[in-house]
Amino acid sequence: VYDKATATRLAAQRGWQIAPDGDKWRRVVPSPKPLEILEASVISFLVERGVIVICTGGGGVPVIARDDGSLCGVEAVIDKDLASSLLARQLKADMLLMLTDVDAVYVNYGTATARALRRVSPTEISGRDFPAGSMGPKVSAAIEFTEATGKPAAIGKLDDAVEIVRGERGTWFEGGASVPTVERLPASRHRPYKLI
């Protein structure tokens, strides 16, 4: 982040787009919707062998294909929630689970009329407005996954992960598929389902 004078100078020198961020200014770049996770087959290979893969946390490195087929990096940011939804679809996951510091998706969050949503369909929640920098991308990712697969997605607090998967906590996006069975397994055994 920069003060306005520095941000304006850098924008002119480097061709940047800038925007206010509170009382400071920052560089902004496009945030295109991810179209493909290029490493999905490698990630699938590892998941099928019981490896816990940590990925899409920063959304990934955005690239475009050149005419000759080579890849070229582009100045952009990829939303981690939309990338997670895409990866879950590419891996044919049984469920998309997004864990955060809030126990559920709320309407009117932070107000006296705040209300947690527990079970919703993509149609019910699609018209609602959620903050772009926090819950909005998670809701969009859950809707995308559920509409594309018919399988459930859920959002909730990290500490409640098992209960969320069971459908007991968090916000559950229903897509027609039943709740996956959650059982306690020894660390050496594979999970009976894929969660992303």
Image: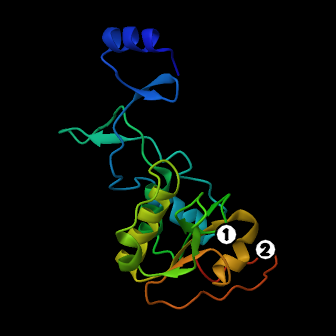
The first of marks 1 and 2 along the sequence is 1
Seen as rendered, the residue at the extreme right is 186
According to the picture, the residue beneath numbered tag 2 turns out to be 188
- Would you place residue 175 above or below residue 140 in this image? below
Between the residue at mark 1 and the residue at mark 2, the CA separation in whole angstroms equals: 8 Å
Q: Quadrant of residue 13?
A: top left
* Disc 2 residue crowd, few under 14, some 14–19, many 20+, Cα 10 Å: few
- From what the image shows, is residue 100 above or below residue 194? above
Name the secondary structure under disc 1: loop
In this rendering, the count of numbered labels is: 2
- Alpha-carbon neighbours of circle 1 within 10 Å: few (<14), some, or many (≥20)? few
Q: Identity of the amino acid at label 1? A: Gly
Q: Please state which of residues 16 and 55 is positioned toward the viewer in this rendering.
A: 16
Q: Residue at x 70, y 85 (%)?
A: 182
Q: Tag 2: residue type?
A: Ser
In this rendering, would 155 be left or right of 63?
Answer: right
Protein image colouring = rainbow
The mark found on residue 171 in the picture is none
Point out residue 123 in the picture as x, y percentages from the top left corner: 35, 78
Which quarter of the image is occupied by the C terminus? bottom right
Give the farthest residue toward the front.
112
Identify the residue at the far left of this view: 67
Q: Residue at x 41, y 71 (%)?
A: 143
Asked if one can make out residue 82 in the rendered structure from this viewpoint, the answer is yes
Look at mark 1 in the image and give the residue it sits on. Answer: 50
**Residue at (31, 10) in percent of width and height:** 12
Residue 53: percent from the left, percent from the top? 62, 58
Identify the residue at image location x=58%, y=59%: 111
Callout 2: helix, strand or loop?
Answer: loop
Q: Disc 1 vs disc 2: Cβ atoms closer than 8 Å?
A: yes
Residue 190 visible in the shown view: no
How far across and down, in percent of the image, does residue 15 sit?
Answer: 30, 17
